[in-house]
Image: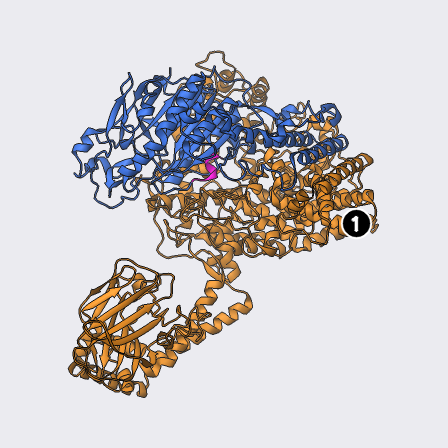
Chain colours: A orange, B blue
Amino acid sequence: MMPTAQVAAEKIVFNRDIRPLLSDQCFACHGPDANKRKSNLRLDIREEAIKPAKSGAVAIVPGQLDQSELLKRIHSTDPDELMPPEKTHKSLTPEQKATFKQWIAEGAEYQAHWAYLPVVKPAVDPALGNPIDTLVAARQKALGLVNSPEADKRTLIRRLYADLIGLPAPAVEVEAFVNDQAPDAYEKLVDRLLGAPAYGERMAVWWLDLVRYADSAGYHSDKERNVSPFRDYVIASFNQNKPFDQMTIEHLAGDLLPNASLEQKIGSCFNKLLLTTDEGGAQAKDYEARYMQDRVRAVGAVWMAQTWLCSQCHDHKFDPMLTRDFYSMGAFFADIDEGIIASPEAGIPVFTPEQQQAHDGLISNRDRLQTALNADTPEGQIAYLRWEDAQLQASVNPVWSALQFGQRTATDGPNLEDKGQGIYHAQGANPDKSLYTLTTNTFPAGMTGLRLEAVPSPSLPAQGSGRADNGNFVVTEVKARLIRADGSVIQELPFAQASASFEQSIANEAHPDKKWSAASAIDRDARGAQFGWAILPHVTQPQSLWLSFAAPVAAAADAQMVVEIHQNHGSGHHTLGQFRISATTQPMTDAVSSQTALLPPALAAVLTKPMEKRSPDEQKSLLTHYHSIAPEWAETRQQLADTTAKLKEMEDKAVRCIVTRSTPSKRTVRVLPRGDFLNESGSVVTAALPSYLPKPNIEGREPNRLDLAQWIVSRDNPLTARVLVNRLWKLFHGIGLSKPLEDFGLQGEMPPNAPLLDWLAAEMMDRKWNVKDMVKLMVTSKTYRQISEATPEMLARDPENRELTRQSRYRLDAEFVRDYALETSRLLVRKIGGPSVKPYQPEGYWENLNFPARNWDASSGESQYRRGLYTWWQRMFLHPSMLAFDATTREECTAERTRSNIPQQALALLNDPSYVEAARGLAVRVLKEARGDDLSRITWLWREALQRTPTDSEKAALLQLLAKHREEFHIDAPSALAFGKLGAPAPADIDGPELAAWSSVTRVVMNLHEFITRS
Amino acid sequence: MNPYSSLHRRAFLTRATYGFGAAALGSLLNNDSQAAGVPGILASPHHTPKAKRVIFLSMAGGPSHLETFDYKPVLAKMDGQPMPESMTKGQQIAQLQGQALKCFAPQHEFKKFGQSGQEFNALLPLLGTMADEMCIVRSVFSEAINHDPAHMFMNTGSQIAGRPSMGAWATYGLGSEAQNLPGFVVLTSNGRGGQNQPIAARQWAAGFLPSRYQGVHLRGKGDPVMYLNAPPGVSAGRQQDVVNAINQLNGQHDAVVHDPEIATRIAQYEMAFQMQSSVPELMDIAKEPASVLDLYGCKPGDGSFAYNCLLARRLAERGVRFIQLYHKDWDHHGDIKQSITWKMEEIDRACMALLSDLKQRDMLKDTLVIWGGEFGRTPMSQGNGRDHHNKGFSIWMAGGGIKPGISYGATDELGYQAVQDPVEVHDLHATMQHLMGIEHTKLTYRFQGRDYRLTDIKGKVLTPILA
């Protein structure tokens, strides 16, 4: 359907009349793609088109109809001669053929493609009012059209609320506005709404589709990822009216800005919003190519409405974008540091300023303690030398002797394997609880104590000494006793005291000691059976638990000693993986400080070397080790551990955002023939801007993402501003000035009112990319303020309202449908930003997600009643109510949603618990807030929901329904009760049947076409 | 008896009351307002269709052709030997990247079935009784080697998200004859073995086509269609009162504002209301005779593949254009022997029952049944399983204008590469559309300035397998 009426006998304008025909009908074979060009003829360049071919024929001879081969061919009746050929399924209408004829007769002048021409601002007399209206009127006048009258104030305020903040206008605001006779009442309203925080939320919806923002990775396991701060950044940017050029730069290169702020880094999350995979068996080269291609498509789509996708495999068929250009664009992103086949990274913590301060404090504390621990003081040196001496002594005359246990059992499956040197390693089954029972008949007489060493091993989880995933264990109780060979007990050997090289202070809330103390390993479970000694995070260091006997153990003939290690933590496999038990006969205080704990073999070797033979590194490694175990550093170590634990806790709890990091080791980018990653025959390319658009000279270095971003928003770029104002226009009229929002290439549409688009684009740049200013200009125009009702004639002539002779009517976007329902019922929680939330969703909707399998746990409390844009965005299974109303899955950048009208929408509004609960909430409001009889209440309700007074027949219909359902629900109280229990149960002080009956009425009103329509 | 179907519907759909021109705007609305049967974009098919509908049995995870439909005695002899490097060098490989590639013998017995002597897994004796109806294609290859992109490719002809799925193309082109049911319906079932690979709703999405062409997932648990059931306490009668009032008030408003979308909205509420009875009626297989339940070997609501096959037949009877069944857990990286045994149990009776039931009702002749996964599996071992493989694998088709009792195409002796009559995924799509009366190069949709089609720039109709 031709959108616009042609003005008869007007001179042919190439860009308007001819280029679309050439592009659509001819360029596939006679255009920019050299590989597919037929007969070596190209019609996209005039010099080529008027040049004689080998055969002598000339496609176009300006002014000479008889000599132009093109005309002969398009009129031919010979199927072999006819252009375009039958097999292409293309054909020209007689009118189109006549247009070609007229054009050649008039001299066959070409123009560069309109969207690639510089933006030149048409001169408009400011005295004539809003230039938008002047330019609209100029075109309407030429076509003999007139505009429509201004809409009434009720319609205007509804429209402004919908367009600027995506929420219904409260009835009191409508009334105030209708009664405000001030000449600037309208402008004041516009200013107020532009200043409302909800403005940013409204604008974000459109932008998040474009940049493909979602809470999941997209491919295969569709894992969740941390990006919600980016969504909040977009909202804040629109609210702060951040200039669009700045926002663009932050999106593409925020990380490259000097001293990039947290906000700018979050902006650079844009580069990470693409689909990623962690599917087993995916090839890195494959996905490296996909990610690069995705990013190039995104830049083309988001800022310049270019369909660069085509150039991924071949030179573009319609636009001058070459394959080489495509991959040169890809090279801009070769510096982005990322795992290719990987689960989503965690991202950086996003702290509030106060949190940041606390975090900085912890960091400096940690650094101070670390420095203190490494400090080389004279006292430290003496202590060290003493230790070294003791170590050497111990090898001659050991203070501790390792015990060999001939009998070893472990409950629930593990096998305790002898690794030599008294070290035992738990193999096999990995239960949550286990009791290790160890029996020896060789132990020194006069034992004063035992030492349990946790010995790390590379074969254990996290290279620790425990069998939990993080390398930890919990020893909940240690017991010892002497027995005879027949098993009868000689005596229990109680412990009097316990200490440890380190006691865990992470996750200490439940432990009565507020740390995983040594004492709780000998308390006969007085603190609770699940509590004991643990060592996170220092699992990779050898750690010791020293236990002194209540009395020295006297020798007894044929006695055996049994040591029991109880591990009853009960979850997460917190058992010892590798350990050694030693005994001493020295006084325990000396024995503990003698520190002849197990040295890692490498260090033991260093120790045996004379000091002067050790390398500085070797000496340092010994010192470091000493600092990690020395008693005099115990307090510092504990403080450091506490600080590190607090830091970790803070970072674990923080909201995080994935951002872009640049790496100097860039990936090599080459042209991929037909987009095939296996084909490495293409030439290697470096970052370069497309050859067909004006660009700056960057000499002596490869341009980077910052250059790319700056080029996109430079005054010379003919596309960005045009694309942006066209999309803004769509927000306020339902259709772009150029209809296809996503294609400003040759297959796009030259806007019928090209001067208007260019004026707006130029104005946008003149106003330094001030989006709010431009929005205000648009919504204060007369063009915007027209009525939206169309006469049958208007509908017949211009069904899509391309000529702007009225306003347009269309359904609200998915997010706003939800917002309208929740706000009208006053259930909406007006909080800005934060992690995404989960409104009710049918059970089992995620059954086909896996790795891991997931359940949708509906949010509780406030989070259940947030605006639609905060809904958790799962790409593989988007929330069904959102999907029903055409929200996109955001897998690819989307400039425009389809706007459908399908039964799923009716089902959602009728039956989705969110909408039913909202309707019931509105019924609660009716019963609590509205005064008078049923009729007055219906009128009140209608005003609240639709901001107008109901007609008599509208009232009658609802009255009738109310009466019927009131009677039914009073008889059928169980149904009313069941209805009241849906979602968060209805207030108890309201009569159930009455509420259910009124809810039928509110459900009707909230399902009306008018309720979800902006007009 | 479903209460929705017994209710007297008020005749509020008197178009004259909507004010002007609702009917005249039919072309603008593109027939959105039709509640009963939805026409497609084509005024009539490009040629006389052989298949009125398609039942696509998607075996998600990638069934091994080497244990199902493509017997390779040479591979058995080469068991444990290195794969010839000339075959595998420079090729796409999934989880076996960087590992020694060794031949792995077929783990199951094969047998010849029917007069046509079609050869497949001996554990499919029931399906074997239908061998003479089947056309086995043993030379399919795909561009993609990982599940997600391969599903996208098999369903949309592209590895880039956002393209319409084949079912959406079918209903876009031809519409649907179904009364009060969607024209494109998807069912899913799980099995044993495999890894329960995820599948995504994008596999039945409308992509850039209007949303009304998207596949509707009919679920075994909860509401079979999202939000189908009225809220608690709202009886069918009360729900109808509400819908009637909505439509009445919408109609009144249209008389004032002349908005063509309102007529469509009214029709959608009608359709939604009708679905509240038509869908439960569809899902209620308890009324099927015992002989039919026995034939399929399923019980009402058991959610099995066999149950879905029976639902597929019921959907076919009701005029649904495109019916897609996903049966999962074919991703046999390990223990392929046992896993395939389970899968054979799951599909043998079900597929036989579907084919014979359709045939008995004289519907097989115009129902195209396709069985296949998103790719096949390597002739190389991965432990005692097989890795993903896209260079050659098998599918079968039956009914709807397909030549019965034949096989087409072949892989090499080791089952690695399709060497005889290789069949691209685009060729499958072209053939499927051809059988439905669609010339695949002519059903296009303009998006981003380009005319897209299911077969992208490729696709040829496989004329040798047409009846």
Chain for numbered disc 1? A
Q: Quadrant of residue B68?
A: top left
Viewer-nearest residue: B388 or A527: A527
Quadrant that contains the C terminus of chain A: top right
Q: Is residue B214 above or below residue A630?
A: above
On the image, the x and y values in percent for residue A136 come to: 70, 37
Task: Point out the stretch of residues depicted in magenta.
Answer: B199-204
Prevailing SS of the magenta stretch = helix
Quadrant that contains the N terminus of chain A: top right
On the image, the x and y values in percent for residue A902 come to: 60, 33
Identify the residue at image location x=37%, y=75%: A524
Q: Residues within 10 Å of mark 1 (few under 14, many from 20)?
A: some
On the image, the x and y values in percent for residue A787 come to: 75, 37
Q: Give the residue number, with chain letter if any, for mark 1.
A: A930
Viewer-nearest residue: B217 or A533: A533
Q: Report if residue B363 is visible in the image.
A: yes
Left or right of residue B380, residue A725 in this image: right
Q: Quadrant of residue B430?
A: top left
Residue B277 among magenta residues:
no
Tag 1's secondary structure?
loop
Numbered circles on residues, count: 1
Amino acid at circle 1 = Ala
Q: Report if residue A130 is visible in the image.
A: no
